[in-house]
Amino acid sequence: MRPWLLAARPRTLPASIAPVLVGTALAVRVGHFQWPVFLATLLAAVLLQVGANYANDVFDFLKGADAQRQGPLRVTQSGLLSPRQMLAGTALVFVLAALVGLYLVEVGGVPILMVGALSILSAVAYTAEPFALAYRGLGDVFAFVFFGLVAVGGTYYLQTLHLDVLALVVAIPPACLVTNILVVNNLRDLDTDRAVGKRTLATRIGDRASRLQYTALFMVAMGTPAVVWASGALGPGVMVSWLSLPVGVRLLRDFWAAPRSAALNPILARTAQFQLLFCALFALGIGLAR
């Protein structure tokens, strides 16, 4: 099982957990919560991310993008699993996600069916042709939309069966912080991606601009609770999320100090951890925001 666990990239899985916590917290605040729906949503989100990671592993290998990578071990490139095995594993994980999704479709109807189908399609299209979103500089947009806006909004909708603007506003911090995971990944791989023609946003805008992008996304995430409080949409409880600020500032400082190399690998893991920490506190704050 070790190769499959490695390919799932467990250190990045908070990316799919955090938005479910935020969307659920907002639903609880308005008086809607069902444990089976929460657990099924969480499981589906994690399975979708694992499927996306598996697809990324095999399709990057098939396109020759992993030959000189500095990141954690890729199982297809290393020969631990064959491309056929990885493709089969990818399909199996998406089938499992779809089976869980059948229950969620029963709860949420056609909108959830469309969201689920688009999520699976986009996860494959992230690195697979003819779309290969990551190779066209659209990976950051994909992460922001699907791991942020869609994940939080979809979670809230499944609990309440309606969607409002506030659900999309509180989705902004998870969306920003999950995108930062990708920013670190693409900055680390900037040189090797450029060499194989993988035109990520980092290869297009360069090192310094990528670091500024990370900083801007961090600041937007941290600023959103204050804006929501100031607008009167939620109470001061949302500011409990700022308890994560010292951790975030240290992370930001270390990110700027780290050279563009494998030294960014710990920063990537810490970025995922910070996203989960911030979002857990943000979810708690939403519950307290009376």
Image (cartoon, rainbow, N blue to C red):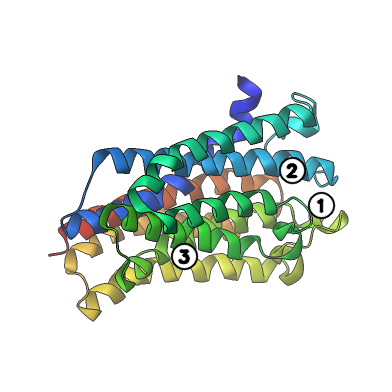
Quadrant housing residue 103: top left
**61 lies above or below 153:** above
Name the residue: 24% across, 64% down.
239
- For residue 245, say whether it is visible: yes
Task: Between residue 166 and residue 197, name the one nearer to us.
Answer: 166
Three-letter amino acid code at the position of disc 1: Thr
Three-letter amino acid code at the position of disc 3: Phe
**173 lies above or below 128:** below
Name the residue: 81% across, 47% down.
65
Q: Which residue is mark 3?
A: 218
* Whole-percent x, y for residue 212 in the image: 59, 70
Badge number at residue 192: 1
Q: Is residue 138 left or right of residue 227?
A: right
Q: Secondary structure at mark 2?
A: loop
Q: Which residue is mark 2?
A: 70
Badge number at residue 275: none
Q: Residue furthest bottom?
A: 231
User: How much space separates mark 3 and mark 1, taking CA atoms?
Assistant: 26 Å
Q: Earlier in the sequence, mark 2 or mark 1?
A: 2
Q: Residue furthest top?
A: 1
Number of residues whose C-alpha sits closer than 10 Å to that of mark 3, classed few (under 14), some (14–19) or many (20 or more):
many
Is there CB contact under 8 Å for labels 2 and 1?
yes
Is there CB contact under 8 Å for labels 2 and 3?
no
